[in-house]
Image: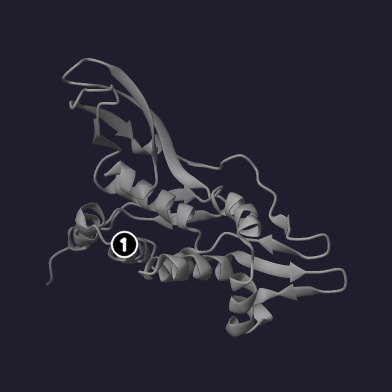
């Protein structure tokens, strides 16, 4: 007769699109993913660890490749809260000029939210007759761009994945139906002024964020800052 194996409790998390995801806490055998996400300096290695952990605790019910990155990070923080503890101590350098001290504050992970910057129109006119509609790249598309070492190539890849449609006075072209070679040529022929217009949209990418206060242990100054992005909460 084999040893009894306990059943892990189930929890729910609601994503930005209203979808409810059921997950369990991660187990001892899966703790390695948390350690990688916490200690690695490689963005792709961190992302792979997060995706592997989410896949494991949701029994594969979540497609981590097509999930928006901010939903993936939010789900991961909820999993971490139910698995290790709902709060985490985060350290900061003092913000006062001339002070090299640090301060620590306790952050309640259950209070972290997906924050959306001011609304930016996804329809961008490049000229009087030519325009594009934009979308946020998903996790898989961002990972591909992040794996590139050349910053110009990374930018081109993000733009190629972020443009949803291209339109003029006569037609609308869905980029999913356009060969990569043609789409790349379109992106490479954008002017720097047009690029600035597109960047405003991508800079409005939602993210997990939390406003916090902390007191410097050296000078006693009380500082305020915003934790933004998954790695800020480790």
- Residue at the image position 52 percent from the left and 47 percent from the top: 206
- Residue at the image position 64 percent from the left and 63 percent from the top: 191
Which of the 4 image quarters holds residue 194? bottom right
Q: Is residue 201 above or below residue 225?
A: below
Q: Position of residue 198 (x, y in %)?
A: 62, 56
Q: Is residue 110 above or below residue 174?
A: above
Residue 176 located left or right of residue 81? right
Q: Position of residue 210 (x, y in %)?
A: 41, 35
**Residue nearest the observer in this picture, 54 or 149:** 149
Local secondary structure at mark 1: helix
Residue under numbered circle 1: 53
Name the residue at the top extreme: 220
Which of the 4 image quarters holds residue 127? bottom right
Residue 65 located left or right of residue 149? right
Q: Position of residue 162 (x, y in %)?
A: 58, 64
Q: Is residue 112 visible?
A: no
- Residue at the image position 17 percent from the left and 21 percent from the top: 217
Q: Position of residue 142 (x, y in %)?
A: 46, 65
Badge 1 crowding class, 10 Å Cα cut-off, few under 14, some 14 to 19, many 20 or more, is many
Q: Is residue 2 visible?
A: yes
Quadrant housing the C terminus:
top left
Quadrant housing the N terminus:
bottom left
- Residue at the image position 43 percent from the left and 39 percent from the top: 209
């Amino acid at each position: 007769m084999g040893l009894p194996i306990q059943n892990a409790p189930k929890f729910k998390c609601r994503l930005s699109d209203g979808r409810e995801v059921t997950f369990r806490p991660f187990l001892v055998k899966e703790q390695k993913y948390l350690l990688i996400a916490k200690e690695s300096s490689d963005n792709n290695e961190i992302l792979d660890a997060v995706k592997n952990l989410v896949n494991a605790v949701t029994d594969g019910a979540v497609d981590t490749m097509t999930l928006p990155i901010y939903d993936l990070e939010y789900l991961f923080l909820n999993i971490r809260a139910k698995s290790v503890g709902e709060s985490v101590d985060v350290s900061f350098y003092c913000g006062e000029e001339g002070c090299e001290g640090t301060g620590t504050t306790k952050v309640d992970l259950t209070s972290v939210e997906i924050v959306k910057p001011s609304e930016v129109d996804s329809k961008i006119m490049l000229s009087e007759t030519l325009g594009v509609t934009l979308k946020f790249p998903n996790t898989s598309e961002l990972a591909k761009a992040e794996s590139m070492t050349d910053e110009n190539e990374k930018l081109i890849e993000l733009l190629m994945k972020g443009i949803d449609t291209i339109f003029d006075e006569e037609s609308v072209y869905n980029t999913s139906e356009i060969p990569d070679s043609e789409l790349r040529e379109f992106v490479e022929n954008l002017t720097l002024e047009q690029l600035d217009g597109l960047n405003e949209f991508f800079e409005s990418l939602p993210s997990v964020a939390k406003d916090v206060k902390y007191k410097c242990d050296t000078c006693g100054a009380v500082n305020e800052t915003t934790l933004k992005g998954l790695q800020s909460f480790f």
